[in-house]
Amino acid sequence: MAFPLAPGSTIGIVGGGQLGRMLALAAARLGFRVAVLAREADSPAGQVSAVEIVGGYADGEAVARLAALSDVLTFEFENVAAEALEAVVARGVPIAPPGRALAISQDRVDEKIFLNAHGLATTTFVAIDSAADIGPALAQLGAPALLKTRREGYDGKGQVWVKQADEAEAAFAAIGAKPAILEAKAAFVRELSVIAARGWNGEVAAYPLGENRHEHGVLRTTIAPAEVEDGVQAEALRIATTLLDALDYVGVIGVELFQLADGALLVNEFAPRVHNTGHWTLDGCEVDQFEQHIRAVAGWPLGPTDALARVEMTNLLGEEALDWPALAADPDARLWLYGKREAAPGRKMGHVNRLSMLEMPE
Amino acid sequence: MAFPLAPGSTIGIVGGGQLGRMLALAAARLGFRVAVLAREADSPAGQVSAVEIVGGYADGEAVARLAALSDVLTFEFENVAAEALEAVVARGVPIAPPGRALAISQDRVDEKIFLNAHGLATTTFVAIDSAADIGPALAQLGAPALLKTRREGYDGKGQVWVKQADEAEAAFAAIGAKPAILEAKAAFVRELSVIAARGWNGEVAAYPLGENRHEHGVLRTTIAPAEVEDGVQAEALRIATTLLDALDYVGVIGVELFQLADGALLVNEFAPRVHNTGHWTLDGCEVDQFEQHIRAVAGWPLGPTDALARVEMTNLLGEEALDWPALAADPDARLWLYGKREAAPGRKMGHVNRLSMLEMPE
C-alpha cells in the first residue's frame, strides 16, 4: 500500500446512489479519479465518475472488476456481501472501511452485542428466531417493543411495534418471518448523531452533533451543531472513538444516538459510511463529510471539523424536489439534487441546507 | 427553449480542462447531467461528466455531436471556431454565452473597439498588419508598447515589449509575424478583476473585486475581496453591466481591469467564461462562479455573490502541485487539484484557497 494515495489515483466506490455521487465530487476536488459499481447505468454516482461498472453489489465478479481499477475500495452502501469482498482482499487492494465493520453493521443483533462488548450502551434487546420467542422477550423487555429484521431494512422498513404477546404471530409475519431482534422502547427525549472519521494511522476527528427528526421512519431534518448540555459533545466523541478503534475503522462513520432524559446517550445503530445526517457539513464546514471520507480512505490527514455556520438540513423526498424553482430562487437555500430520474414517493431526491449565524460561545 | 432547465437536463460544455471540470461539479450539485467535448480522453472535465466526446474545438462535427446531447451548450474555452457553432445554431440548441461574445473576445483589436464603442475605457492601441506599421504606431502610443497577436495567445504567450522603432522587424517575427495589436503601456498601479454573471432575463450579479498578481504572464495569486477605495466596486459593477448588456450575454464573464493612480479603471480584456481570478469564490461564497455560470445558462435565478470570508487564492503551477502532502495537512489550506497527469512547467495543476475573517464594515 502506498498511502497517502497521490492525486490521480483511482478510488473505487461500491454503490451508485447519492452518497456515491457526493463522494465522487469530493474526490474530484482533490484530484482523484473515481470508478463506481452501480446497479444501473447512468446512476447518480456514475454520472460524475470516470468509470461506471454496472452490476450487483453481491456480484463478486463485478466487485473484482471494480477493485482491479482501484487503488482503494470503499462503499456508499453497507449491504455488500462479505463473499464479494474476498476476491478484493485476495488481490491486495486495500478496503476501507474494513469488511468486518460492514459485516457487524449488517446484523442488528451482532451490532448491539459488539457495541455492548465495548462498553457502549444500547437499548436492551433479545434475538428472535421464531414467533414463539416474542412472548417471553416481550415479558422481559416490557411492552411495547420494536421488532426488526436482523438484516437489511432501512428507513423504517422491516420493523413493527409489538404491544401484546398475542400479536407475536402477526408481527413476525409482518416482517417477513425472518431472523429478528426485539428492542425495548428507549425512553429517549431526542435523536442525535455524530459523524466521525478515522484514518489509517488511527487519527480520529468528529463533527459537532446533529439533532435529527424523522417522519415515517425517514430522516426529515438535521439541525447542527445541536444545542447540547455540557459534556455531551465530549461523550459523543468518546463513543465514536471507542467504536472506531474497536472496529479498526478507516473512513467516515455515522453513529445514531438516543439521548435520555438524564442526558445520557445510547447508541441506536451505526452506518459504516457517510450518512444522511452529515449532509449539513456540505455547507457548514470547510471540509465536509464526503471530503473527510476520501481523505481518510486515501490516507490523507483528516480535515478540520468545526462548524462555520448553524445549518438546518431538510431532505427533499419524492415530489418535494419539484419545488426546485422556488428553492433555486431562495438566496438562503443551498440546494443539492441527486440526478435521479424517478421521483418515487419517499425517495431521497435531494436536500436543502439553510445557514444561519452560529451563536458565539460566551 | 424551456428555461429554466429542469434538473436532469444535460449541459454541454466545450472544453475538457479544469474550468470544465469545476463547471461539471457545480452542475452535478444542482442535479444536471453533463456532456463535454475534450481534446483527449479522460480529460479533467470528462472524468466527472456523464459523457465525454473526444474531438477538436474547431471540429464542427464533434461540436454538433455534443449539441445533439445537450439542452444548452456552453464553453470553458473561448477559442471555438465560429463556423463550428453554426450547426448548433441551426439545430436550435441554445448557446450561452452567445457566439458573438466569443468572436469579439477572440480578436484583441475587435475587443478594444467594442469596449470603447460602449464607453468602456481601455489603454490606447493601434492595429498592426506588418512590421512596417510598428514604427508609426510606437511614435503615436509612446515607448515602450506591448505587441500582441490579435488572436490566440494567453498567459503571456504571443506578446513582446517594443522599446524602439528599430526593434519592429524582430518583434513582429517574435510573435510569429501574425496580425497584431500594439498597446500603449498602461500606467496602472494594480490589476483587479470583476467576475460577473447575467441571466437570460437580463439579471446581473457581480462578485466583489479581486486583486491579482501575475508572474511571467501567468496568474499567481488573487486576493478577494480586494481592498478598494469608495466607489470602485460600484464602478466595476457599472463596467460589467455595460459590457454584459452590450453583448446580450448569458453566463459568467471575467473582466480584467487596470487601476490607475487616480483610482480610475481601464478594461484590459474580458474572458467569456469562468475565470481563474474567480476561483476564490469556491471557498469564499455560498454560490461560487461555477454554480453561478450553470445557474445563468440554465435560466435559473442567479445566486448571492457576497463574500463570506477573505480569500487568498494561489495557483499551483507545474511541480508546485507535488506539495500536495503538505497542503493536505494544512488545516488553513483548501486544496483543489485538477486531475491532470503531466505536470509540465507552468501548467495549472490546481490551486489553494486560504481563508481569513472578513473585516466588518465600520
Image (cartoon, coloured by chain):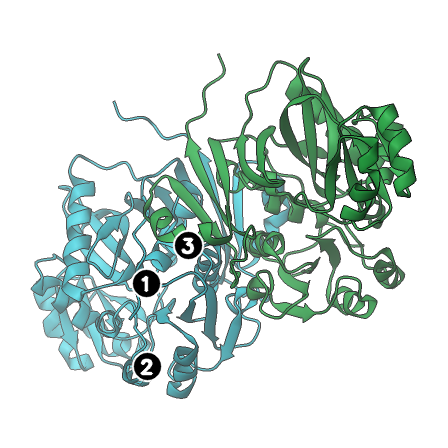
Chain colours: A cyan, B green
Q: Amino acid at mark 2?
A: Val
Local secondary structure at mark 1: helix
Find residue A115 and report its horizontal and vertical position in percent. 14, 63
Label 2 sits on residue: A88
Q: Quadrant of the N terminus of chain B?
A: bottom right
Label 1 sits on residue: A297
Find residue A139 and report its horizontal and vertical position in percent. 9, 67
Q: Amino acid at mark 1?
A: Val
The residue carrying pointer 3 sits among few (fewer than 14), some (14 to 19) or many (20 or more) residues within 10 Å by Cα, namely some
Gap in Å between the C-alphas at discs 2 and 1?
16 Å
The residue carrying pointer 2 sits among few (fewer than 14), some (14 to 19) or many (20 or more) residues within 10 Å by Cα, namely many
Which label lies toward us, 3 or 1? 3
Q: Which labelled disc corresponds to residue A178?
A: none
Tell me, yes or no, whether the two marked residues, 2 and 1, touch with CB atoms within 8 Å. Answer: no
Find residue A180 and report its horizontal and vertical position in percent. 22, 75
**Residue drawn 31% across the image and 26% down it:** A360
Label 3 sits on residue: B322
Looking at the image, which is closer to me, A52 or B240?
B240
Name the subunit of mark 1: A
**Residue drawn 91% across the image and 43% down it:** B129
